[in-house]
């Protein structure tokens, strides 16, 4: 695996929302009139309660209407200096905040007041807010991209000093509270902290301005298929023994090294630590190697039979044995990836391509015998030089070598779509990118093909 590339400076993306808790999301910074509580009072924001099928709607005059969610109070009937433009729920769904365009904050239920810009002369009006994951703070965002932090909300950067093509209209925080997005009305996205840039509509020909931003459950495209592969369009990282400690916060999925180098070497000393960081959307990888000479005793018998010096037979048994070994090792330390990648790179393979192919076939069979999915990490250049004409129709492929997620012929999306980057009759499922020619960084990013 190559060394990782550094995070780039904040980049333009799309949208912003405020989060409630669990799998619920509080949608803030909707434009006035986007949701009408009553025709006479344009709605300023809607927010979703957690763990119950209900929601509140906040009107521009501070009125709050509740639907299967507990009404905690409102400013209805009390004159406001400026209209309400955003709202957010507390993590337990038992309270909410409302934000006015002058930065005034109104807290209800178990929502705590941590401060406001109500007495500050602002360069531009507040247009949205987002709470921290624990509900002990919040951010306010102004239309010029200025960020105001209260409680335990960290300041991670702003666009206040940037000349924007269009005003900011919404914001959202990442699931761990260590990053946030801002969205402009033209669909441009600005990312800070651990908020990943996943694309934007900036510069598009959309006939109407964008007005609201929503994230997935954990602030990034999340989860995985039941087969252990990441959801299409999501972005993650692969990590190894060389990245122990200091792991990136934002990821939708992760691939963690199990073997510390050669397939028959010891384990990655940080495997359990990195697996805990990766969470439920984790797959694992092991390095593939050619059959040693002399062949080890573990390769003399197995599913390919009693080999009696037949190198092809020994190669198959060798791959099969070690694939099962690593799945068993992982289970033994309490880590249960549903999918495993077999790394086929130049360097430690035999010049006998047919024996190499036998090792690979044996490894894939070994993974499958353990009830887990399996795929191949390699490139269209390396594969035939290691495995010859070995075909594994339909097998998931993890391909290295892209520069960015999208934007040119060498981008991850191009690797996904262009059959020339595939090999072995498989389907390109994951693309490792960040090969930009710049100084390598610690973490390799990966893109899941749509």
Image (spheres, helix red, strand yellow):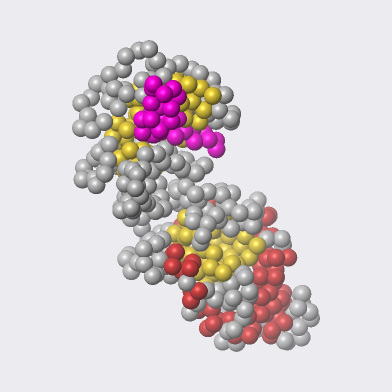
> What residue is at 41 percent from the left and 61 percent from the top?
405
Q: Is 246 rendered above or below residue 1?
A: above
**5 left or right of 296?**
left
Whole-percent x, y for residue 155 in the image: 32, 37
Q: Which residues are magenta?
A: 20-46
Horizontally, is 294 left or right of 24 in the view? right
Q: Note whether 363 is above or below 55 in the view shown.
A: below
Give percent across and percent down for residue 438: 32, 66
**Picture coordinates of residue 63 (x, y %)?**
41, 19
| x and y percentages locating residue 317 in the rendered image | 71, 76
Residue 440, located in which quarter of the rendered image? Answer: bottom left
Q: Residue at x 45, y 41 (%)?
A: 214
Number of numbered tags placed on the structure image: 0
Identified at 55% across, 54% down, the residue is 231
**Residue 352 is at least partly visible in this image:** yes
- Residue lying at 77% horizontally and 74% vertically, measured from the top left: 303
């Amino acid at each position: 695996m190559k060394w990782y590339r550094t995070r780039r400076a904040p980049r333009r993306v799309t949208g912003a929302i405020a989060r409630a808790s669990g799998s619920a999301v509080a949608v803030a910074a909707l434009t006035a009139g986007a949701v009408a509580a009553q025709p006479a009072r344009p709605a300023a924001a809607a927010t979703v309660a957690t763990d119950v099928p209900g929601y509140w709607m906040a009107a521009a005059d501070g009125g709050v209407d509740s639907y299967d969610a507990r009404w905690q109070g409102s400013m209805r009937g009390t004159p406001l200096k400026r209209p309400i433009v955003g709202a957010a729920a507390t993590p337990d769904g038992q309270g909410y905040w409302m934000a006015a365009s002058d930065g005034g904050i109104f807290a209800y239920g178990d929502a705590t007041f941590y401060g406001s810009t109500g007495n500050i002369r602002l360069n531009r009006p507040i247009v949205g807010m987002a709470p921290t994951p624990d509900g002990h703070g919040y951010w306010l965002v102004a239309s010029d991209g200025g960020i105001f932090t209260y409680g335990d909300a960290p300041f991670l950067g702003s666009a206040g000093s940037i000349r924007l093509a269009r005003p900011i209209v919404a914001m959202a925080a990442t699931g761990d509270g260590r990053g946030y997005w801002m969205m402009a009305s033209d669909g441009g996205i600005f990312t800070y902290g651990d908020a990943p840039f996943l694309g934007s509509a900036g510069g598009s020909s959309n006939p109407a301005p964008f007005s609201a931003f929503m994230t997935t459950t954990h602030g990034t495209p999340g989860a995985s298929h039941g087969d252990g592969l990441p959801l299409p369009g999501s972005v993650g990282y692969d990590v190894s023994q060389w990245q122990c400690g200091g792991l990136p916060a934002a990821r939708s999925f992760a691939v963690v090294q199990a073997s510390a180098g050669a397939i028959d070497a010891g384990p990655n000393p940080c495997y359990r630590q990195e697996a805990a960081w990766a969470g439920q959307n984790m797959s694992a990888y092991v390095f593939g190697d050619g059959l040693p000479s002399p062949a080890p005793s573990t390769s003399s018998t197995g599913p390919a039979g009693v080999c009696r010096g037949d190198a092809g037979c020994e190669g198959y048994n060798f791959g099969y044995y070690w694939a099962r070994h690593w799945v068993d090792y992982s289970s033994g330390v309490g880590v249960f990836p549903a999918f495993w990648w077999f790394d086929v790179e130049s360097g430690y393979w035999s010049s006998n391509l047919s024996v190499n192919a036998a090792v690979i076939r044996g490894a894939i069979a070994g993974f499958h015998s353990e009830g887990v999915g399996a795929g191949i990490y390699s490139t269209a250049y390396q594969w035939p030089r290691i495995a010859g004409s070995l075909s594994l129709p339909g097998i998931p492929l993890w391909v290295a070598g892209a520069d960015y997620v999208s934007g040119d012929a060498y981008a991850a999306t191009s690797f996904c779509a262009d059959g020339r980057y595939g090999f072995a009759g498989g389907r390109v499922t994951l693309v490792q990118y960040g090969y930009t020619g710049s100084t390598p960084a610690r973490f390799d990013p990966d893109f899941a093909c749509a």
